[in-house]
Image (cartoon, rainbow, N blue to C red):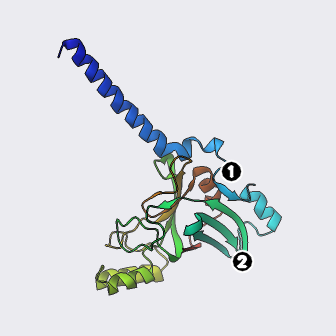
Amino acid sequence: MTKNRLKKTIFISFAGIIMAIIAYNLWAYQGTLLSPFLTAAGTDSPHKPLSEVIKSEVVGPPIPNLLLEVVKSKHTLTLYSGKIPLKSYQISLSKDYLQDKRMAGDRRTPEGSFIITEATSYSPPRRLIGSKLLLLNYPNKESAMIGFRERIITGSDFLAIEKAVGENTTPPQKTPLGGSISIHGGDGPLMGNSWTDGSVALYSKDMEELFQYVPVGTRVVIKR
């Protein structure tokens, strides 16, 4: 191989690596980068801002009897005030989203009743998460009972999870049942609807809107 040919090969290889990095970051950040152009693109109904919906329904803020309901088969997250649906958002879930989560790494979205235990903002936004994240208290007591019965976790793991759930705090996140299940931003139009590791992902613009009205302690129901 001549010197010029070697230089050309090195340049092409280097350029390929740079392009791959740029492509990955555009994909991973697209929910945030494109959010100014996707204000309603990820929203199911109604398309008007949540602030206007709340005013028209005369429910606050703060929203009384607040509930978030995730229906996995429909890929929707709906915000309720009591039995009144205020607004629905299109969401992305995990690869094996129709199955209930059982353990770390199974890439399933859990089912059941949870509460939000932590609310986190990121500046600058994080890849695949965006700028807002609401952490759920997974594993909950039901998941822990199943895990203990199937010998996935130990008795001490179960008791630690039970204690956290009883105190409405974040349960242990490093047991074999897994953790870090949240509602966050970072979704985008080219990512499909099954790309998370188990969490619920919204378009970043939608998540930033939702985040304003959903405090720690809010109940979240996830069903098939």
**Residue toward you, 85 or 211:** 85
**Badge 1 or badge 2: first in the primary sequence:** 1
* Location of mark 1 (residue): 40
Task: State the residue in front, 34 or 166.
Answer: 34
Cα–Cα gap, marks 1 and 2: 24 Å
Q: Secondary structure at mark 2?
A: loop
Can you see residue 209? Answer: yes
- Give the image quarter of residue 176: bottom left
On residue 83, the disc is: 2
The percent coordinates of residue 73 (x first, y second) are 56, 68
Residue 163 visible in the displayed image = no
| Residue 56, horizontal then vertical, whole percent | 82, 63
Q: Residue at x 58, y 63 (%)?
A: 75
Query: Which quadrant would the C terminus be assigned to in this image?
Result: bottom right
Residue at x 64%, y 46% (from the top left corner): 38
The residue positioned 40% from the left and 68% from the top of the image is 179
Count of residue discs: 2
* Residue type marked 1: Ala
x, y percent for residue 8:
28, 18
Q: Where does the image place residue 41, in percent across and percent down from the top left?
A: 65, 49
* Mark 1: secondary structure: loop
Q: Amino acid at mark 2?
A: Lys
Quick check: 164 left or right of 86?
left
Please rate how many residues cluster around mark 2, counting C-alpha atoms within 10 Å: few if below 14, some from 14 to 19, many from 20.
few
